[in-house]
């Protein structure tokens, strides 16, 4: 099996799992997986598709600038430049972007802080952090409509081989060394967002939560 087919199947599996969670509303979301390092190539979702569907036109191979690496009628995701920033700056192997109601609410609630911080949750261990009462923070950036501008702002927060950024009233982009790690981190962030939104509602209702 060629490396492209192997990586295609890996990304298709992650895509199916995120689809099963119903995280691809209204064609939103984009995913990618690194195929080669030198030169850099990665498979990225084709733009505008319903990512819940599985077809043989789901992904296309792009180069280090996010341009198609082979002749194709498919268009790379409109947000490919964000994936480009991650692969060019880190050793990440996979990037996942989803729009959920919870990630949008958290991005709105904490936009003025420029970040959202979570602590006191067992699931923080999914990030490889084992200390008791550890805190995790996720930056929140403005949702600039101009993608090159958005990608430049986004790049300021791309530091390690695994990480995540919230885009205000848009969605989350998560990356990891492997597809397994990226998906684990995405699920952990979404757990924290959902937990926090529900806690705030229960607090508002006068119920005794933290
Ligand atoms: C309908 S979602 C809006 C899109 O602009 C974008 O944010 C998105 O996540 C999907 O765009 P795509 O070009 O299909 O990767
Ligand atoms: Zn998006």
Image (cartoon, rainbow, N blue to C red):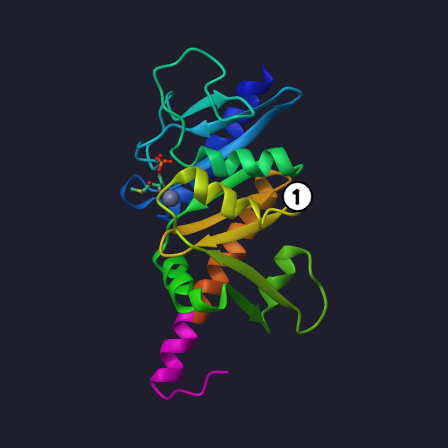
Point out residue 95 in the picture as x, y percentages from the top left corner.
53, 39
Give yes or no for residue 202 being in the magenta stretch: yes
Ligand 2 rendered quadrant: top left
Q: Nearer the viewer, residue 66 or 21?
A: 66
Given residues 203 and 71, the one toward you in this image is 71
Judging by the rendered image, the residue that carries numbered circle 1 is 161
Q: Position of residue 101 (x, y in %)?
A: 34, 58
The answer to whether residue 194 is magenta is no
Task: Name above or below for residue 102 compared with residue 45.
Answer: below
With respect to residue 165, does 109 lie above or below?
below
Which quadrant of the structure image shows residue 76? top left
Judging from the image, what secondary structure is the residue with disc 1 in? Answer: loop
Query: Where is the N terminus found, in terms of image quarters?
Result: top right
User: What residue sits 49% from the left and 39% below the top?
Assistant: 82
- Which residues are the magenta region? 197-210
Q: Position of residue 30 (x, y in %)?
A: 42, 38
């Amino acid at each position: 099996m060629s490396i492209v087919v192997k990586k295609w199947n890996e990304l298709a599996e992650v895509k199916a799992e995120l689809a099963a969670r119903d995280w691809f509303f209204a064609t939103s979301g984009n995913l990618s997986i690194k195929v080669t390092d030198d030169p850099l190539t990665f498979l990225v979702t084709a733009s505008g598709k319903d990512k819940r569907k599985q077809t043989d036109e789901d992904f296309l191979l792009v180069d280090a600038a996010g341009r198609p690496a082979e002749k194709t009628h498919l268009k790379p995701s409109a947000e490919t430049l964000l994936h480009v920033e991650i692969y060019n700056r880190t050793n990440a192997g996979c990037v996942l972007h989803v729009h959920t109601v919870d990630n949008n609410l958290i991005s709105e609630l904490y936009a003025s802080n420029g970040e959202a911080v979570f602590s006191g949750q067992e699931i923080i261990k999914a990030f490889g952090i084992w200390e008791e009462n550890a805190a995790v923070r996720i930056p929140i950036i403005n949702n600039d409509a101009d993608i090159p501008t958005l990608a430049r702002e986004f790049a300021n927060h791309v530091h390690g081989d695994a990480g995540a950024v919230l885009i205000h009233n848009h969605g989350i982009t998560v990356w990891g060394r492997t597809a397994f790690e990226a998906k684990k981190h995405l699920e952990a962030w979404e757990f924290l967002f959902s937990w926090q939104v529900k806690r705030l509602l229960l607090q508002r209702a006068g119920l005794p939560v933290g």
